[in-house]
Image (cartoon, helix red, strand yellow):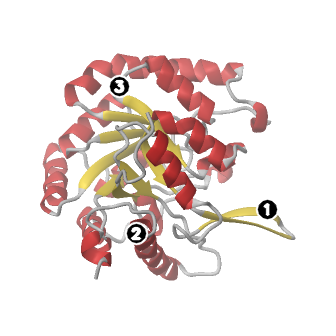
Amino acid sequence: MLQNQDRRFKLGMHSYTLHLSGFGESWGFQEYGEHHTFEQVKTFEDLVDIAVEVGLDVLHITLVDIQNDISAEHLAACRRYAEEHGIELELNVSFHAPSDPRVNCTIEDSLEIAHTLGCKLVKYSTDVKHPEKSSHSCMCASVVAQLAAIAENFRKAIPLIEKYGLQISIENHCDLFSDEVIWLVEELAHPQIGACCDTINSLMLMEGIESCVRKMAPYVNCVHFCDNRVFADPDGTHSVGTAIGQGNVDCAAIIKILREQAPKQLDTIDLEIELPLSGYSIEEGRKLELKGLRESCEYMYKTLGVGYNAANIYNH
């Protein structure tokens, strides 16, 4: 059933948006075969304070953001601080992250952590490996074997998923074609298990952005909303992250698709930005991240009509 174009979403932020400050995860170093981390210069409480300052409704966090302290006392304290400030939480984990193993977690452990934190949703990066050449490797034999094992692991966890009432979201995290995510969701066939569509990750597997969003929209219960500038120079073709609304992605068209086609389980749009660090010091990069976050929140609220708490910031 098509949804009304007045359908309103909460405004969330994937904490990777502030990865130069040590939040989210350190990503993009996998080609070096090494683990790298950016120094964490702020606390979880600081992250919640930033969320309030820029008008977010939801924080989409990783284990890094809680300093990988999963003691009951620490999780309860983080939950309390977020609730006191009116910020909902979602948890983002990986199985075998190629750059930053601090975000890795099993399904069962992640469900327990999310429940204790008071999260409404857990998003999973499956870290499936495709053979070279990757462009035509969708649902190839080696990938299907990995997907079958992943599906069985999720199936075993369904009683715990149901017990805690959590939404489960499987992402096209630079490692899954949209058809592979959809296969997993359809194979599991459970109302609490859906897809996370990252609006830029499709480029990593050479899928078109619009076609990927249209294909995944009927299955999504989570969205990583990104914008990039795509350009060519003598070194080749590049895709560089920008604040939302400042790149080449038709953000309004994507929101329209989601309003029309996404199921009711999708109640939040999590913005995610990744600004280029080249040419800046890391201190300058951290300031630019915060600036880009504020500009993105204002654009999403004023132009795209996303968010509730943002009204307290941008209606003045």
What label does residue 175 carry, if any?
Answer: none
As measured in the structure, the alpha-carbon distance from the residue carrying label 3 to the one carrying label 2 is 30 Å
Q: Nearer the viewer, residue 114 or 188?
A: 188
What label does residue 297 carry, if any?
Answer: 2
As measured in the structure, the alpha-carbon distance from the residue carrying label 1 to the one carrying label 2 is 28 Å
Q: Nearer the viewer, residue 141 or 314?
A: 314
Which amino acid type is marked by label 3?
A: Pro
Dot 3: element: loop
Q: Nearer the viewer, residue 241 or 268?
A: 268
Q: Nearer the viewer, residue 182 or 240?
A: 182
As measured in the structure, the alpha-carbon distance from the residue carrying label 1 to the one carrying label 3 is 40 Å
- Residue underneath mark 1: 237
Dot 1: element: strand
What label does residue 191 carry, if any?
Answer: 3
Sequence-wise, the earlier of marks 3 and 2 is: 3
**Which residue is at a point 73% across and 32% down the rendered structure image?**
131
Give the percent coordinates (x, y) of residue 57.
28, 59
Give the percent coordinates (x, y) of residue 97.
51, 43
Query: How many numbered circles does the render carry?
Result: 3
Which amino acid type is marked by label 1?
A: Thr
Which amino acid type is marked by label 2?
A: Cys
Dot 2: element: helix
Task: Judge whether residue 104 can be spotted in this image.
Answer: no
